Amino acid sequence: MAVRVYLGFDDTDMPDADRGTGKLVRWFGDALPEGCTLWGVVRQQLLVAPEIPYTSHNSSACAVVDAPERRILPELIRLAVAHLEHLALPGSDPGLCVACEDDPALATLAAFGALATRSVVTQAEAYRAAGEAHLSGHGGTNGGVIGAAAAVGLTARGWNGRFIEFGRLRSLPETTSVEELEASGIHVCLLDRDAATPAPKTPVVTGGWLRPMLLGGCAVLHILEDDGIHRPALRRERRTTAAKPGDTPDKHVPD
């Protein structure tokens, strides 16, 4: 019987690297075994606070994989570990969490993930939340287990995060249409006090950067209308926050 699997990764990069955790997780789609498909990759934002060591934004990412049967789970974990250990940068503190959609630990992982968005949490709490689900550290302090566990819980809950990989997300033109977005599996919602349902042919100017939100377990793109032009409500932001003690402000690393 087909099963959905959540694979959370965190803390795989270093300052001034040419790739972040988001890109590493997107690349995992190329390492999937036969019969498995990547439904999407969701970025999760966790608490930003002085006492938390992180590289740039304190975000983690979760790959959502549709597998043909549950018994392929050990192979998925093996491949995820190999992918992480091969591509995580020296000096990072990588972590991996893996759970199936029917894993009883998802409820406690979701609660842990919500807590990690507003409070400082520990590795011990992450392991308690994971229960019998797979949670492992792969270098350094192993601090990435916190974000990996949170990524799985929040993504499985279905109401947090933004997609950094989903269907044709990265190949859609800079100006697309509502019907093309819907055909790609992205639900379009106009944000307005008296919002009407946007017509199928309505053009949406994305500027080449499109990141739907994970809402109700679906990819949802909120759009705004300004002078007759429809654009995504969520647009690219460049941040240069230094994170770990002694770091210099980091350059933007695309996800």
Image (spheres, rainbow, N blue to C red):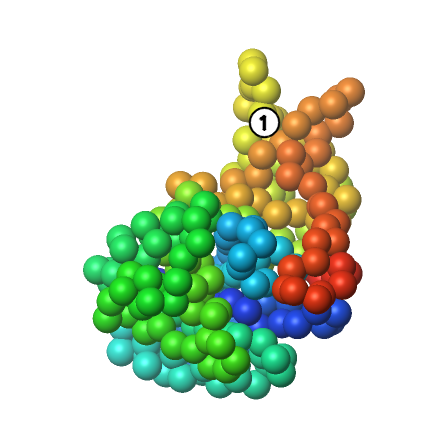
Q: x, y (%) of residue 24?
A: 59, 71
Write the residue at 29% across / 61% down: 129
Write the residue at 33% across / 67% down: 124
Between 144 and 87, the one lying in front of the other is 144
Report the residue marked by disc 1: 190
Residue kind at label 1, given as amino acid type: Leu
Between 212 and 88, the one lying in front of the other is 88
Q: Decide: few, some or many residues near mark 1? Use Cα within 10 Å; few <14, some 14-19, many ≥20.
A: some
Between 162 and 88, the one lying in front of the other is 88
Specify the quadrant of the image occupied by residue 70: bottom left
Residue 209 seen anywhere in this rendered image of the structure: yes
Specify the quadrant of the image occupied by residue 34: bottom left
Q: Does 112 sit left or right of 189 as displayed? A: left
Q: Does 95 sit left or right of 55 as displayed? A: left
Residue 177 seen anywhere in this rendered image of the structure: no
Q: x, y (%) of residue 21?
A: 59, 67
Using the image, determine if residue 77 lies above or below residue 214.
below
Q: In which quarter of the image is the N terminus?
A: bottom left
Extreme-top residue of the structure: 194
Specify the quadrant of the image occupied by residue 196: top right
